[in-house]
Amino acid sequence: MALLRASLEMCRREGVAIMTQTHRGLVTQDLLRTIGYAQAIPDLRFDLDLSHYIVAGEIGGSLSP
């Protein structure tokens, strides 16, 4: 979480927008952890790719057109 906070602060100082991508094998690899980051760091923004959670089995069910 310290890295996320530091990255957000550095980008804020430099006037650069930052988005945290959800991805398997990274700090946002599971929904519970990602929700925790969002709650702890309200300014954190996500580039949400739900396919990583579907592939990991965190979001299931029938996917029909």
Image (cartoon, helix red, strand yellow):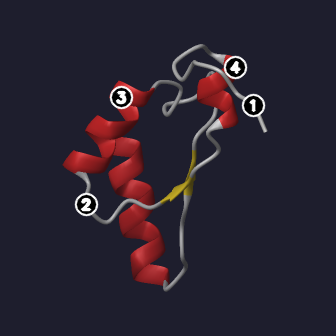
- First in residue order: circle 3 vs circle 4: 3
- From what the image shows, is residue 45 above or below residue 24? below
Callout 4 environment at 10 Å: few (<14), some (14 to 19), or many (20+)? few
User: Which residue lies under the disc numbered 1?
Assistant: 64
The answer to whether mark 2 and mark 3 are in CB contact below 8 A is no
Q: Earlier in the sequence, mark 1 or mark 3?
A: 3
Q: Quadrant of the N terminus?
A: top left
Of mark 4 and mark 2, the one earlier in the sequence is 2
- Residue ID for mark 2: 42
Looking at the image, residue 57 lies above or below residue 18:
above
| Residue bearing mark 4 | 55
Which numbered disc, 2 or 1, marks the residue that appears first in the sequence? 2
Residues under labels 4 and 2: Cα distance?
Answer: 27 Å
Give the image quarter of residue 23.
top right
The quarter of the image holding the C terminus is: top right
Q: Nearer the viewer, mark 3 or mark 4?
A: 4
Q: Which residue is mark 3?
A: 33
Disc 2 is placed on an element classified as loop
Q: Residue at x 40, y 48 (%)?
A: 4
Q: Residue at x 59, y 27 (%)?
A: 53
State which tag comes first along the sequence, 1 or 4: 4
From the top left corner, tell me how far across and down residue 19 is, in percent: 55, 61
Q: How far from the left and from the top, in percent, is residue 62?
A: 65, 21
Direction from residue 27 to residue 8 in the image, left or right: left
Would residue 1 be seen by someone viewing this image from the given angle?
no
